[in-house]
Image (spheres, coloured by chain):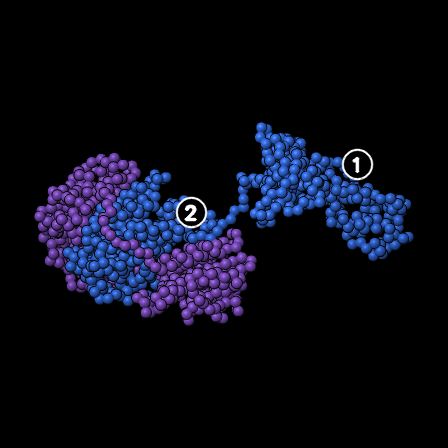
Amino acid sequence: MVYRKQVEIKGQKYWYLFHTVRSGDKYLKKSKYIGKELPKNIEEIEKKFSEEVKMEKEEIPKEIRELAETLHPYERKILPFLKDNKSLKELVKASKMQEIEVMRALQWLENKNILSIKKELKEVISLGSNGKLYLQNDLPEKRFLKAINGIISVDKIKEKAGLEKDEINVCLGLLRRKAAIEIIPGMKIKITDNGKKLLQKPGFEELFLKQLPLESKNLTQEQKYAFNELKKRKGIIKTDIVTERNIELAGLYNDLIKAKISFKNIIDELSPAIIKDSSWRNKSFRRYDIKINVPSISGGRRHFVNEAVEYIKKVWLEMGFKEMQGPLLQTSFWNFDALFTAQDHPAREMQDTFFIKNPEKGKLPEKRFVDGVKNAHENGFKTGSLGWRYKWNPETAMKNVLRTHTTVLSARTIASLKKDDLPAKYFTVGKCFRNETVDWCHLFELCQVEGIVVDPDVNFKNLVGYLTEFYKKLGYDKVRIRPGYFPYTEMSAEVDVFHPVRKEWVELGGSGIFRPEVVKPLLGIEVPVLAWGLGMERAISMYYNINDIRDLYRNDLKQLREMKAWLK
Amino acid sequence: MPTITLDKKDVMKLVGKEIPDDRLKDRISMLGTDLEKVSDSEIIVEIFPNRPDLLSEEGFARALSSFIGVKTGLRKYDVKKSLFKVKVEKSVENVRPFIRCAVLKNVNLSDEAIKSLMQLQEKLHLTHGRKRRKVAIGVHDFDVIKFPLVYKAVKPDLISFVPLGMTAEMNLAQILSKHPKGRDYAFCLDGLEKYPVIIDAKNDVVSFPPIINGIVTQVREETKNLFVDVTGTDVNAVTQALNILVASLADRGAEIYSLDVGGIVSPDLIPRKMKVELSYVNKLLGLSLKQKEFEELLSKMGLGYDKEVLIPAYRGDIIHPVDVVEAAAIAYGYENFQPEIPNLVTIAEENPFEKFKSKIAELLVGLGMIETNTYHITNKESLNKKMNLELSCVELSNALTTDYDVLRSWITPSLMDVLRNNRNREFPQKIFEMGICFKENNETETGVEEFTRLAVLISHTKANFTEIKQMLDYLFNILCLEYKTEDTEHTSFIRGRVGRVVVDGKKLAYIGELSPEVITNWELEMPVAALELNLTELFELILKQKTL
């Protein structure tokens, strides 16, 4: 039974309708908001409310109610027309919806097993561009015949009937074949009795054009004749293969109809107005297919290599290292000589290093560094070393190069330190350059991670310690070092990590302890300096599953948008 | 670094023990050579440039045999004295000053031995000898030579002889221009007026170093005794090369005889001595080796010990006690050093400019921009012609291709190239990059100034000045900077749609719509709005404002 009641909310009184119904062994109290005043049609509203409640009470199976709630407005709109209209065309006409809307609705309904769409291929004959014209203005041969008045010249007919030259030719051939005209020498024409008959009633061709479109398999004898005649002529008719869609109602359709669900209480979109006036209460929202694929989007982001570089920097910062920075262009003095690389060392040759044309040479640093380095090369500079024992040339040291390793920054940093600055730990992540032909595993610009630890008490085990810790943080639990060679380190060690997926050792960089011939000229004292210069491209490529190193810097926006995040 | 291919069977024979492949691979890596491959018949390794003594089957086997404990300790090489002489004339002083020689008798010249000798000679020439300029080796049939020999420098047209590989006499200049070896190695004698030759007592030319030997001393199948000459520009390198070669031949049983070469007894295979304190070794390695253990480790590296470390004459690379420490470390096994992080308290510090760059990137990413990462090396056409500009730039002197032969002066061209490569990708395209740019400035150490620029490019059907200026506005608001935009001319941009961004009187940026001509030059069809900002100067301004 429905009853009215005023409810007080925050001092204001509002009218509500209430109805208590029994559902199974529970009582449910349904309510409906009316307003501050009772409207005039209150009885009508009460009746409707009672019906609504009754309908809900009528044990509609849960899955059917939920199915109904999933229906999109297009689906709901097309639903009533499904019983009497089976083809897409009929449904479009009956529902007055757009064809695309009907198509989508049918597709969705099919997905919900409410109907199925049957596709059928049909060959359909329809009017061509000339055909449409002729349907309006008569076929050329008819216009030809109409234009004949006694004996008349072809030119006159052409003018009177408004025909093109090729149309005239077609008409002449066609009408002679049908014995509708007679040609008199001098290009004059006369109509025959047959011709006069033809004028009296429409021909098969004319009728056929009026009946189009037709499906080619359903043609009558006469239609076939007309089709064969007309298809020889230009642009009058065309045949197309068209897909015709028909629906067949499926299992859930009947359940849905039987349930007589009212869609009035389904909200399609939540709007500010609905939130404000509380009208969403006692209504349900259209259920979405939450499994649906949504169109992809992408946002702004950093280059994935830089994402990795930021992380790598963080690793060293966490271990208490200071960041070094410095120019990409350096004199050979810092890049090679300060690092005890003899002036005739192969690394200093044209094929390995980029030299600069303008300006070709730079300036050497203050004298104490130049003298120290010169002596280190020539005689070992008071380190107990023999040195390389050749005449060191300052001009060679002035040559500008694009730095071939970030180790040049370590050399400069050591030169800037004083005894009181120790212990010191520095790192940098930066570009260096090699004069290489680019291929899948070579680039001419490389990203290197550099680090040094300067302290009188550090030793070789500590070097292994820092490298192991670093690679652990990059995800490689197994690190090994093997003997290597660099002119500026002794011990020199190559660093390998064990690739957990490929199950093999991968070489990732070089490391060692700087030779006294490097440290003493720059720092003034002999102190062990742990040092490493680790190529980052390989480690970064392995993380992103990149096999061709060039793909790191291809800058393909699709790749940049979709590349997986650096999750370390 | 030279890669050599060794005859595995021969190496095993020389080592004196068969080694299973797995262990062989592991030991070769840990000995200090870069292993490429071990197959049934070959060992392929890369030899580090400090160890030319490993460039032959004999030298490699010698080191390996010690390392795995088959034959450890210092090898002794007996040198018998001979009365033969090589006179060295003063004329070679400014030409190719150094020569060392040896005589080897009863040399085993089996196929393996000859193959090994040839590879050793070739690889020594290539790396240690810097393509023969620094060191060149000649190997001759000793028995046909009439001593004494003379090493001297002569005018190129003064002497003719039949060089190896030829049938007619040629003078030295002709050899350089016509003989294949002459053409290959003529560069070693560039700029010299006289060329070095070794002539015997019959006036036969034994050698024209570093180019070619005379045909008379050619080594034949029946040759038993060899004369070896090594010439060059660096006495240590010359001596070391000779010692390596002689030791290798002696390892196969040859007897070594010394000669008087310009007053010096050559070869001299007496081990060098070096004082190395055990405490120094232990401190650097973080170990606590006892003296005996240390000596055992050295012995595994073929070094000896008698109060001081004894270094074999073929190990020219040991020039400082630290090299002995490394030898001990290799013998100890790099794999046996346990990782250990020292307790060193230091305070971490990120470079402030790098921090600033990260902040800028964060803001731009928030605006939906994608960061790119392009090369510093580019080409003039991209920087200038395609941008409708004519600016000077820093050029490389030895670039491999003209696509990459100058250093970039601004970033926008690199980003235009990115847009060009992404023509078929989804729009809108909004990209940015912060990168180092270069320009000449003779006040810096190298004569080149480096500064970081930011470029922002927006490209879609409606990309325009307003959109790019909104970004600039947003950025500068957040950085608490006031700026002015001034009218300017820039041929890359549309006239009347380009501005100069000025902060505190400093011109920091260009902003505007790129001209359709530039867009077309890059084979693009979409409008592009761009901002190019000098971040280095911007950061300096911010630092200045902070201190005020």
Chain name for mark 1: A
Q: Could you say where residue B272 lies in the image, as x and y percent from the top left?
A: 12, 51
The answer to whether B105 appears left or right of B440 in the picture is left
The residue under label 1 is: A221
Amino acid carrying label 2: it is: Ala
Measured from the top left, where is residue A484 in percent x and y? 25, 48
Q: Is residue B132 visible?
A: no
In depth, the one of A226 and B499 nearer the eye is B499
Q: Colour of chain B?
A: purple
Q: Quote the CA–CA distance across marks 1 and 2.
A: 70 Å
At 24% from the left and 40% from the top, the residue drawn is B27
Relative to B380, is A347 on the left or the right? left
Which residue is depicted at the point 22% across and 38% down?
A: B12
Q: Which chain is blue?
A: A
Q: Amino acid at mark 1?
A: Gln
Image quarter hosting the C terminus of chain B: bottom left
Which residue is at a point 59% across and 42% down the rendered structure image?
A: A281
Quadrant assignment, res A360: bottom left
The residue wearing badge 2 is: A565
Earlier residue among tags 1 and 2? 1
